Image (spheres, grey):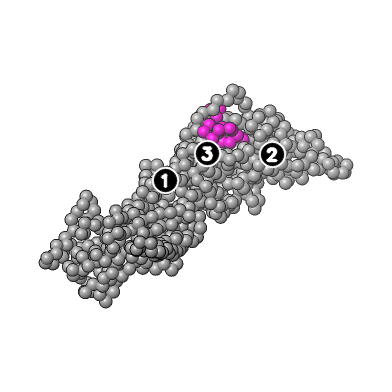
Amino acid sequence: MNELKVKIKVPEGAQALKRAQYKALKRFDEYDSPPLRVLGVPFGGPIKGRDSDGEAFHEGTDIAMNVGDSVPITYYHGFGPDNPNDWQEQPVWLGVAKYAGRDERGHWFEAQIDTEEQLALRVLEDTTKARASSGAVSHLVRMGQAGLIDVWPVGELALFETSDWKQPANDFAVIELLNVEVPTEAVAKAEQVSAAVEVSTTIEETIEIENKGTKTMDENKELEQAEQEAPAVDMEILNAKFAELNGRLDEIITAKSAPMVKRIPKFDKDDETDAFLYWVKTGDKHAAAKAALQEGTPTEGGYLVPEDFLGRIIAKRDEISIMRGMGAQVIGTSRDKLNVPIENAAVAPARTAEEAAYNQSEPTFAQVQIEIHKVTNLVKVSEELLEDEAAGLGPFLSAHVARHFGLWENQYFFTGSGTNQPQGVFVGGTAAVTSDFATTIAASEIPEMFFKLKGEYRDSPACYWAMKDSTLGLIQGLDGDPFKFIPTPAGNIMQLWTKPVRTSSKIAAHTSGLKSIVFGDFSYYMIAENKSLRVIRNPYLYQGNGQVGFFWNQRVGGAVLQAEAFQYMTAHA
């Protein structure tokens, strides 16, 4: 089956669009459009030397054509002119293109199209905004290394005016008007000479012959003499050649197989998450423009992750980020620093004698500054995962990104220094107990630490213990008389002295000199977030490994609001 491989961006699942009229192809010289010069197979591409598929033609690409060979011209490879989801039940044949040769820019064609065809007029209306695309016999296409195309047997040429969704794979595939005025009779004579001597010429050579009709009388006489000396044209042979050419074109025209195009996944442009995942798969930010606000970048562009998909990431992140699960305050900001006023000293009511002066005391306030930090993560996704519809890309990305951002928060919201990092509770809190031993915990040290935290904080629903699993294991093994400290489960949350315990691998083990346990009211920890999670897609950096890189970043900070709300234990040095 003869299929075509094309170089345009087209949607999957297009519906047939019927054409009321069928127009057969004419011969090249039967069209009356202005002569067009088309770069049908451009070398290189606008995206780091590649087209939107990450591929490129090069000087050694074999297009299986000789100068003078002809191919039909279609409108947009048979796809619909006004709807990205339509394709033409009967393709529109715009005209015929002749291969004219190659230069440093690529392979050029001379094109003549039908000015009675409305879609042809769209192309001619502004050729500077029109583009071309070549279609190749797919089973003969051969790919080289690094996305370079070694063999591309051209079977047809497509022309179309560009739009938001109607784009070539390679924007170098331009269309130019040949602004030369040549007398009709001179053109006819030149074509007769060319046919008689079977000379194939490039565009530049043809223009040079045609221009002889506008030169001096002596030069015209020389041209007439050359015509008289040329062998007589055998019309039967010439007609036989035209019949053979028309037969080859008819085979292409009547082929029932649809073009083989680069399949792009379906998506609902009005669904932000669907459009976002479409952009993740394809990198086409123009088609998926409704996915989210765009962040300008020098490569493929970035997005703020849409709310629905962000919700999935946040839900999973909150499962891993235990600070958020313990009731820390979360606030949004548009600044790089956030100043939070806190109570420093409260009023002090006092007994007052009859007719004595009122006791006077005022609350005082301090200020905590939360610095916003840029948090980043790189996710490498295989090309196969992006292409495989059944691979579950959405759940994979949301779980992977959420896990890494959640683990980052666990590390710095507990142990961050507060300098070029968020301030962790082990830094902003209060040193309560230093254990008697470097690697174990005494039974008496647990109630000692429990009562170091003031009752008003212990009564809070956000009051928790936090430690490493290994430290919890030490406590579970305690059996000091008269105290029993084996934690008891409350649902899925372990409890220690009636208060829930959460564990994290980012908290230090109970080892010489390290801060290992914190007990406090976590509503006195504040997390500040600047806007939303962003993602940038880079399809080139890891292309050699068959991967696409996704660079995620978010701006977030955190700090303790009241030092006395957090009491921590330090292992004996």
Q: Which mark is residue 10?
A: 3
Q: Residue at x 47, y 60 (%)?
A: 338
Q: Residue at x 64, y 44 (%)?
A: 174
List the residue tagged with mark 1.
309
Instruction: Check disc 2 and report its element: helix, strand or loop.
Output: loop
Membership of 346 in magenta stretch = no
Q: How far from the left and from the top, in percent, is residue 432?
A: 28, 69
**Side of 385 where 55 appears, left or right:** right
User: Mark 3 vs mark 1: which is more N-terminal?
Assistant: 3
Q: Which mark is residue 461?
A: none
Give the magenta part as a residue range.
69-90
Membership of 89 in magenta stretch = yes
Answer above or below: position of 91 versus 212: above
User: Mark 2 vs mark 1: which is more N-terminal?
Assistant: 2
Q: How far from the left and from the top, in percent, is residue 183?
A: 81, 36
Gap between marks 3 and 2 measured at Cα = 22 Å
Q: Residue at x 22, y 62 (%)?
A: 472
**Side of 235 where 405 appears, left or right:** left
The front one of 509 and 288 is 509
Q: Quadrant of residue 216?
A: top right
Q: Which mark is residue 126?
A: 2
Give the residue type at disc 1: Phe
Gap between marks 3 and 1 measured at Cα = 26 Å
Give the residue type at disc 2: Asp
User: Mark 3 vs mark 2: which is more N-terminal?
Assistant: 3
Tag 3 near tag 2, CB within 8 Å: no
The front one of 487 and 242 is 487
- The quadrant the C terminus occupies is bottom left
